[in-house]
Image (cartoon, grey):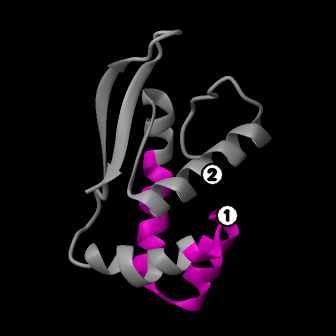
Amino acid sequence: MFGTRKLGKTSEQRRALLRQQVTDLLRNGKMETTFYRAKEVQPVCEKMITLGKKGNLAAYRKAMSYITDEDVVQKLFKEIAPKYADRNGGYTRVTRTGARRGDAAEMAVIELV
């Protein structure tokens, strides 16, 4: 596991949540979620982009084992990773947007730079 935040879920639920949010972030390039979820998704997403930059079969299979949609993995390896070929990290940005109405949870936007 990358972070130490439990996010109020069991380990299986937390793993499923992170897998789906990483898939959605790579599919859309941007998403809004709670701040702490965004901070948990950030290192996982950056690791997936690093796998995409490697571009070999082992990295492709490793990404396929985590990302839940094959089309997103192909997009990662063909479109997203080549954009960051000359960058050594820092592929995502988390920006706080304020409190959510209803439960006042701190919201943030996570996006690919």
x, y percent for residue 88: 26, 67
Whether residue 57 is in magenta: the answer is: yes
x, y percent for residue 94: 32, 39
x, y percent for residue 52: 45, 77
Q: Residues within 10 Å of mark 2 (few under 14, many from 20)?
A: some
Q: Amino acid at mark 1?
A: Thr
Q: Which residues are magenta?
A: 42-71
Name the secondary structure under disc 2. Answer: helix
Q: Residue furthest front?
A: 101
**Can you say whether 102 is above or below 75 in the image?**
above
Tag 2 and tag 1, C-beta contact below 8 Å: yes
Disc 2 to disc 1, C-alpha distance? 7 Å
Image quadrant where residue 31 sits: top left
Q: Residues within 10 Å of mark 1 (few under 14, many from 20)?
A: some
Q: Which mark is residue 20?
A: 2
Q: Would residue 72 appear left or right of 82 to someone viewing this image? A: right
Q: Would residue 5 appear left or right of 110 to someone viewing this image? A: right
Q: Residue furthest left?
A: 86
Q: Amino acid at mark 2?
A: Gln
**Can you say whether 86 is above or below 3 in the image?**
below
> Foreground: 41 or 28?
28
Q: Residue at x 54, y 71 (%)?
A: 72
**Can you say whether 70 is above or below 55 in the image?**
above
Q: Residue furthest bottom?
A: 57
Whether residue 51 is in magenta: the answer is: yes
Image quadrant where residue 95 sits: top left
Residue under label 1, please give it.
Answer: 68
Is most of the magenta stretch helix, strand or loop?
A: helix
> Foreground: 28 or 95?
28
> Foreground: 10 or 26?
26
Name the secondary structure under disc 1. Answer: loop
